[in-house]
Image (cartoon, helix red, strand yellow):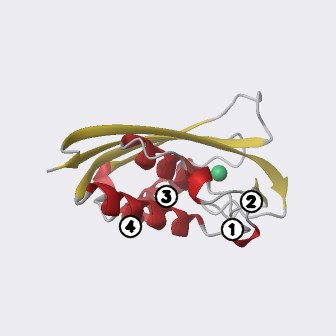
Amino acid sequence: MNGFRIGYGEDAHALAPGRRLVIDSSPVGTVAHSDGDVLLHALSDALLAAYAMGDIGQYFPPSNPNYRGLDSRVILQTVLQRLADQVGEFRILNLSAVVVLDQPRLGPTRRDIQRQVAGELGIDVSRVGVTFKTSEGMAPDFIQARATVLLHTE
Ligand SMILES: [Zn+2]
């Protein structure tokens, strides 16, 4: 398992009034089985994919009521632990993520999002690239995220 590994993940959730967006205090939130944080879900899948370990749906099946409203940070930390168990010590060299959302505009929250994600991963903020796009009205009821990670094991 030594050497470089790249991982890619995607996620999307429907937006609905009265739910929290997690990464923003918007009046619109996501409809999801867990807390619906698309960025952390895409990132968790990317980490698993880097080592061909499946996806978060396998570890947290939506059919299991125990995972209703589950904090996405718990999902991410569980994934990091599974990776450590399976591949040993690994380093996350950098993360590149895209969040697609029409409203609200996330630009002003970029630093905060970078800080939160870096904190969860235990890496420097300079290794967490986050870009924001809109769907230009093509998917106004959805929030989507895509994430790529580069990892290294000795
Ligand atoms: Zn999700």
Is 151 positioned to the left or the right of 102 in the image? left
Disc 1 target residue: 67
Structural crowding at the residue carrying mark 3, measured as other residues with C-alpha within 10 Å and reported as few (<14), some (14–19) or many (≥20): many
Structural crowding at the residue carrying mark 4, measured as other residues with C-alpha within 10 Å and reported as few (<14), some (14–19) or many (≥20): few
Disc 3 target residue: 113
Which amino acid type is marked by label 1?
Tyr
Structural crowding at the residue carrying mark 1, measured as other residues with C-alpha within 10 Å and reported as few (<14), some (14–19) or many (≥20): some
Quadrant of the rendered image containing residue 132? top right
Mark pair 1, 4: CA separation: 23 Å
- Residue 9: x percent and y percent? 51, 40
Mark pair 4, 3: CA separation: 10 Å
Which amino acid type is marked by label 2?
His
- Residue 154: x percent and y percent? 14, 51
Whether tag 2 and tag 1 are in contact, CB under 8 A, the answer is: yes
Structural crowding at the residue carrying mark 2, measured as other residues with C-alpha within 10 Å and reported as few (<14), some (14–19) or many (≥20): some
Label disc, if present, on residue 56 of the rendered structure: none
Q: Earlier in the sequence, mark 3 or mark 1?
A: 1
Mark 3 vs mark 2: in front = 2
Disc 2 target residue: 33
